[in-house]
Image (cartoon, helix red, strand yellow):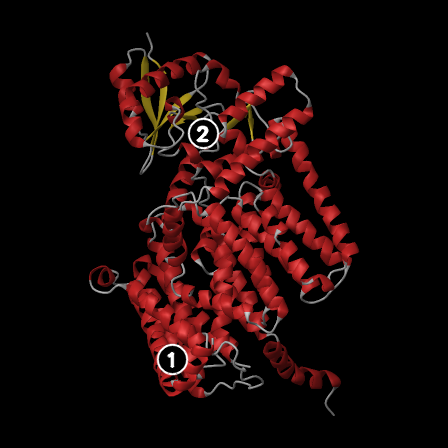
Amino acid sequence: MPSIYKINIKKIPSFLKRIVLKHKVEIFLFFYFILMFIFYSWTTLTNSQSLIHVDDREIWLVSHNIYKNHSLTYEEPLNKFLKHNVFNTFETVFVDNKIVPRRALGIYFLTASGFLFGENGPFFLISILGLACSVFFYLLTKNLFDKKTALLSTVLFSSSFPIIHWSNMLFNNIPAFSFYMIGLFFFSEVLVKKKNKIIFYLLSSIFFSLSIWIRYEYLVFVLFLIVWILKDRKSINFKYLVISTIVMITILFPILLLNNYLYKSPFLVGYSVKSNNQVKEQISYTEKQLLKLITRTISGMKSTFKTFLSKLFKINTDIVFHNFKNFIFNLFPQILPFALFGIIYTLKSKNKNIINFTIYAIFVLIFWMFYIMRGYGFGGKDAIAGASMIRYLFVTYSCIILFSIYLIFKLLNRLPERLIYFITILVVIASILNTVNLSFYGTLGMVKTHEIKKKINKIDTTIKSLPSNSIIINDTFNYAIGICNRKVFDMLMIYSATTIDLDSLNPKTDEVVDTTIKYIKILLDLNYPIYVLEKNHFNLVKNIEEKEEILDTKKVIGGDYFDIYKVFYREK
Amino acid sequence: MIYIKSFIEKNSDNIALFLKINRLLFLISTFVYLLLLIINQFWNKIFEEYININAIFILLLMSGVFFLFPIIKEEEKFNKKRKLEKEDIFLFFIMGLICSVLVWIKIKDFAIMSYIISIIAGLIILVLSILIFYD
């Protein structure tokens, strides 16, 4: 007689088969998300991470300072010896001679917490949030539509170039969008799944607050939820809604306190401090005059809203159409026609949750189109991959994908099945090829960016062998932005350009070189070892050798694409 | 409105014929548009010199308007379970293979990476197709 164990063992294959068939989508997604995480963290996994933009450098510097010194502000002691702030990038914001954060404060705390897991921790954190964004995008669309729409739209969304590329970068767009997605998912649990429990209200308000902490525009996206709430007010428990609103206000309130501490007004943010010189003067004036908090509050609020409204209402239709064509149409040409019809189909849906969500999405998309696409020239057609502005359009891309897939599944019921199979697969093939093309061959696509980062990473690793108080001289056009292991002297700061413009800089080359040499002598007198990283835009080593009688240079490290020279006084 | 209704009633046969032709036009323009987008990834000079893909995009939108709006309120064919047949699986396999080859051609300069990514792309097409079209 067979034992009970033998019978159970015989049952295992059929049991496994049942499990696999029942959860086939989840099993596929599990392996798919593991694969996506490898792509999202490719630069970090291959140990090639570095900084390539003033924005990620600023995020890295401020958050590293929080991690090391537990402070949001820091000072550069050497600035007092030199006329120019050569140890900072041209986007640095100063208030009372202290360097203050420039963007929404949440990203600094998030990145600082990433340092707990090592130097690559912040980069992994962004990739993990990129993955969380895809996972919750699936869960949200599954709540709103159905499993198959969710599956196909998640695959297209998570494998799209913008998501893969920006999950490898230390910017705040992926984390903010990810928290917003998580918040929306919990919100949909209340409105769509009718789970009227306080926990879902609280979780959605916590994640919405986190997204606002990281990017302030998400406040407007969250406020637009009023439209959805009003349309579906019967599903809302107003007591819980009030509690979650209070929780959200409580979580957001410290932003005002920190703004007041950093920028001397609760409603002044780093962007308006930087962009509005008058406000900067006003800050120091108000400080001197010791005006009351209320005056500073009103002044800060005025400045911030002025910046916000000027962005919203200065509409340049040419720029809007240019950006739409190059950064929406050219990125998703395979699904855009379906998306346009998809929106109309969702509005005609019999499911009121889909209609309410679509109305909410239309509000967000219209606002976002006018706010973000109206003013910035994102770049030309050739720079689709390299345009850093595409990171602002995740909301737009996700809606385009969602509405187009909704329409494709609607067509499944109208057209011959094999025809729709063929069309859908063609759409997916076109999407994959588009991602591959942009990643591998796009101007500053993933491969190009990876190469640049790898080079900078190698330099940054090499300079670790130099004395800890060394100063590395270079410029923004080359490697200055990416060097983190030693103090960097950026020659571009002598020119003090507000934008990087080689044509206007070239006539000033001699002035920059002379001033740099003067500063080198000051720093040598202060006993700092000085190294020049070649290549740099100003051919500094050659200029020192030609112009200088008391300074000498010596190559100490030679690489494939860079050389490091030590600068010192000639022996008498 | 009365004039429009009477016009539609009078010309119902012609309108039906127009919608039938338009349906065909929509399907053809969808195919052509998607195929050209894929070809564009390999020989984009064709589009710069000979074909304007934007014209096909506009044709697709126009035919889409006439195809999709009349059927927007039509009853859907619900509760019809889709069963995949061997031919369907074969179609998915062929499409997955085509995707793999296209991806490999695109990135063949990237050595081992090109093989890995093209295999993954083909597998995604095959498995995804089965998952989304099989009830």
The CA span between labels 1 and 2 is 58 Å
Tell me whether the residue at label 1 lies in contact with that at label 2, contact meaning CB atoms closer than 8 angstroms.
no
Q: Position of residue A377 (x, y in %)?
A: 38, 44
Q: Can residue A186 be seen in this snapshot?
A: no
Picture disc at residue A496: none
Outermost residue toward the right?
A239
Which residue bears the numbered disc 1?
B23
Query: Which of the 4 quarters of the picture holds residue A2?
Result: bottom right
Q: Say whether mark 2 and mark 1 are on the same chain.
A: no
* Image: A7 above or below A367: below
Q: Amino acid at mark 1?
A: Arg
Pick the quarter of the image with the C terminus of chain A. Answer: top left
Q: Secondary structure at mark 1?
A: helix
Outermost residue toward the bottom?
A1
Outermost residue toward the left?
B49
Q: Secondary structure at mark 2?
A: loop
Residue at (30, 31) in percent of width and height = A502
Q: Position of residue A278 (x, y in %)?
A: 51, 24
Q: Can residue B123 be seen in this snapshot?
A: yes
Residue at (36, 16) in percent of width and height = A515
Q: Position of residue A230 (x, y in %)?
A: 67, 59
Q: Nearer the viewer, residue A538 or A136?
A: A136
Please state if B45 lies on the left or on the right of A482 as rendered: left
Which residue bears the numbered disc 2?
A89
Q: Nearer the viewer, residue B75 or A479?
A: B75
**Parent chain of label 1:** B
Outermost residue toward the top?
A572
* Image: B112 above or below A481: below
Q: Position of residue A534 (x, y in %)?
A: 32, 30
**Parent chain of label 2:** A
Pick the quarter of the image with the N terminus of chain A. Answer: bottom right
Q: Amino acid at mark 2?
A: Thr
